[in-house]
Image (cartoon, rainbow, N blue to C red):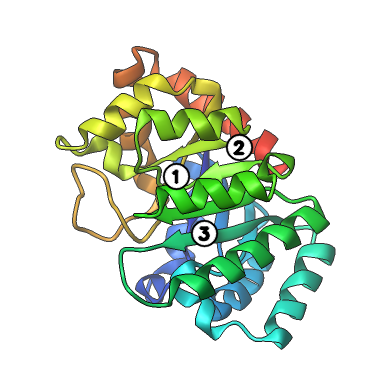
Amino acid sequence: MIFETHAHYDDEQFHDDRAGLIGSFPQNGIEYVVNIGSSVESCIKTVELVKQYDFFYAALGVHPSEVQYITDEFFEWLEEEIKTNLKVKAVGEIGLDYYWQEPERRLQKMWFERQIELAKRRHKPIVIHSRDAAKDTYDMMSALKCGETGGVIHCFSYSIEEAKKYLDMGFYIGIGGVVTFKNARKLHEVTQYVPLDRILLETDSPYLAPEPNRGKRNSSLNLTYIAERIAEIKNVSYEQVVEKTNENARRMYGI
């Protein structure tokens, strides 16, 4: 059975068919889903969503592009949910994103650090978003001793050299639909390099749909394409990829 480690089913793109789509997952071989908070609003929606499905769990945190909307009141709520809600298994997605100029980097770094410290206080793994910010992300995580929390580098987009640093820190590498793209040579190399027992399957639904559905709304039903491509790259069976990544995800999320 497949473990979907990173999706956003609270997103408005699922408003019309959310219940039917999610209801189809078990019969399509999907055992668990972790819905990932990325904004103040999505964290609140995620808490409500995971109440509805036994096989859904949550990660709560605020994406770097949304940190300007965090208030002290929300942060208190966030810590209380992470402390008391048994379905909240991680802090994320959090990190740094320098693709856009806003929010300013100082603010991104401040909230990245505060959310890491929250994870450490509550003994939760972290789900990391990092885009065009390789050095600052690693430097902050190293200085803040993120090896104590563990977690995953979501939608990994850097080099083998960067992957090695995070593996040495004890992190997993999240691999999604981009691995199926023909021009994703760097990610193909990373996928071949990273041991299978350190890879997590993810879709980032509704974003980043794999081939042959690239450009369409993504869902966890597309995880089979991702697992098949990983199996090809690593020269192992599809069943091995599904079984090992499920085991990895259970271990990281404590399920």
C-alpha span from label 3 to label 1:
17 Å
Mark 3 or 2 closer to N-term? Answer: 3
Name which residue lies at 68% across and 39% down. 147
The disc label shown at residue 202, or none: 1
Up the image or down, 212 lies above or below 10; here it is above
Which residue appears at 26% of the width and 45% of the height?
A: 210
Could you say which disc has been placed on residue 143 in the image? none
Q: Are marks 3 and 2 in contact (CB under 8 Å)?
A: no
Give the structural element (helix, strand or loop) at label 3: strand
Amino acid marked by disc 2: Ala
- Quarter of image, res 148: top right
Element type at mark 1: loop
Residue 209 vs residue 45: left or right?
left
List x then y, in percent, for residue 86: 80, 58
Q: CA distance from mark 1 to mark 2?
A: 10 Å
The residue at the point 69 percent across, 34 percent down is 251
* Residue found at x 53% / y 35%: 166
Label placed on residue 95:
3
Whole-percent x, y for residue 254 in the image: 74, 41
- Residue kind at label 3, given as amino acid type: Gly
Label 3 vs label 2, nearer the camera: 3
Q: Which badge, 3 or 1, is on the more N-terminal residue?
A: 3
Q: Marks 2 and 1: in contact by CB < 8 Å?
A: no
Residue farthest along the top direction in this orientation:
235
